[in-house]
């Protein structure tokens, strides 16, 4: 065999070369992780629910926790349209914009009290591992308040790129937010892993050609390539191995 003639240097070289031989021809290693914010880094769902419910009450109806779950990963204006449709209420665009601004004020009032204690379990340790491994990180959130929240919890400098609602035109499940994140990291989509807790976010990752890790129940995040309960107790090495296995690389 050719590799035996060219590389007679022993077992270790043989293993390395064999692994290279069984990788796909166009194999590009994972080099970047893209994270949603809410439900992955922090959990501000209760703040969103309180603000959205207050807005719904303003126009004469109520929303439940269950309905609020359908708004995860959805942009502010798209959320307003879904809420109004849920309450069978029709409003002018100007009135919708005014409500959006009011809802955001209520929400900002609540998140202004956030601290590093609000970071979800396992996140800080996982980001430390990413830094040690030299893996690039980007935020991919439709929230226009992502920068403020990251500043409040002390994680603004943990990301190599931040793509939020101020930088995109289309909300999830459109892949724009993740494609822009990959571009800012200087990576191809196939080199990126997305961490998401919302169905719309998982769909966005898949439509963007990225590996999708769902944070939550696999029964809900059915499109995810891999589902885990949280980042707690997760190691980068274990995750990359699981991704390779899921993609049939090296096995």
Image: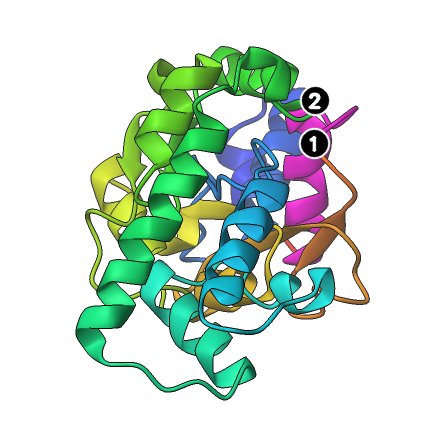
Name the residue nearer the viewer: 167 or 207.
Answer: 167
Residue 146 pos. (x, y %): 36, 35
Q: Element at badge 2?
A: loop
Q: Marks 2 and 1, Cα distance to the nearest angstrom?
A: 5 Å
Q: Quadrant of residue 204?
A: bottom left
Crowding around mark 2 (Cα neighbors within 10 Å: few <14, some 14 to 19, many 20+) is some
Kindly report the secondary structure that dominates the magenta region of the rendered protein.
helix
Magenta-colored span: 231-247
Residue drawn at 71 percent across, 60 percent down? 65
Residue drawn at 40 percent across, 57 percent down? 26
The residue under label 2 is: 122
Residue drawn at 66 percent across, 26 percent down? 120
Side of 168 relative to 193 (left or right): left
Task: Say if residue 172 shows up in the picture.
Answer: yes
User: Circles 2 and 1: CB distance less than 8 Å?
Assistant: yes
The residue under label 1 is: 231
Which label's residue is closer to the chain start, 2 or 1?
A: 2
Looking at the image, residue 90 lies above or below residue 223: below
Identify the mark at residue 90; answer none if there is no mark: none
Name the residue nearer the viewer: 82 or 194.
Answer: 82
């Amino acid at each position: 065999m050719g590799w035996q003639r060219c590389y007679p240097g022993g077992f270790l070289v043989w293993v390395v070369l064999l692994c290279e031989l069984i990788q796909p021809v166009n194999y590009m290693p994972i080099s970047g992780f893209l994270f949603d914010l809410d439900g992955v880094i922090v959990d501000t769902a209760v703040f969103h629910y309180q603000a959205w419910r207050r807005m719904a009450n303003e126009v004469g109806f109520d929303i439940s926790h269950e309905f609020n779950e359908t708004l995860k990963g959805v942009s502010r204006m798209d959320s307003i349209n879904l809420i109004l449709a849920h309450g069978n209420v029709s409003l002018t665009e100007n009135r919708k914009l005014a409500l959006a601004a009011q809802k955001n004020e209520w929400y900002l009032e609540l998140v202004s009290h956030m601290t590093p204690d609000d970071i979800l379990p396992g996140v800080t340790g996982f980001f430390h591992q990413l830094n040690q491994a030299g893996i690039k990180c980007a935020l991919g959130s439709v929230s226009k308040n992502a920068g403020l929240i990251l500043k409040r919890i002390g994680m603004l400098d943990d990301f190599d790129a931040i793509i939020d609602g101020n930088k995109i035109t289309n909300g999830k499940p459109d892949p724009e937010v993740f494609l822009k994140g990959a571009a800012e990291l200087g990576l191809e989509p196939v080199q990126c892993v997305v961490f998401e807790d919302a169905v719309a976010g998982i769909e966005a990752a898949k439509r963007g050609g990225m590996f999708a890790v769902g944070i939550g129940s696999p029964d809900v995040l059915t499109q995810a390539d891999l589902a885990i309960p949280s980042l707690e107790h997760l190691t980068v090495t274990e995750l990359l191995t699981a991704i390779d296995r899921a993609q049939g690389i090296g096995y």
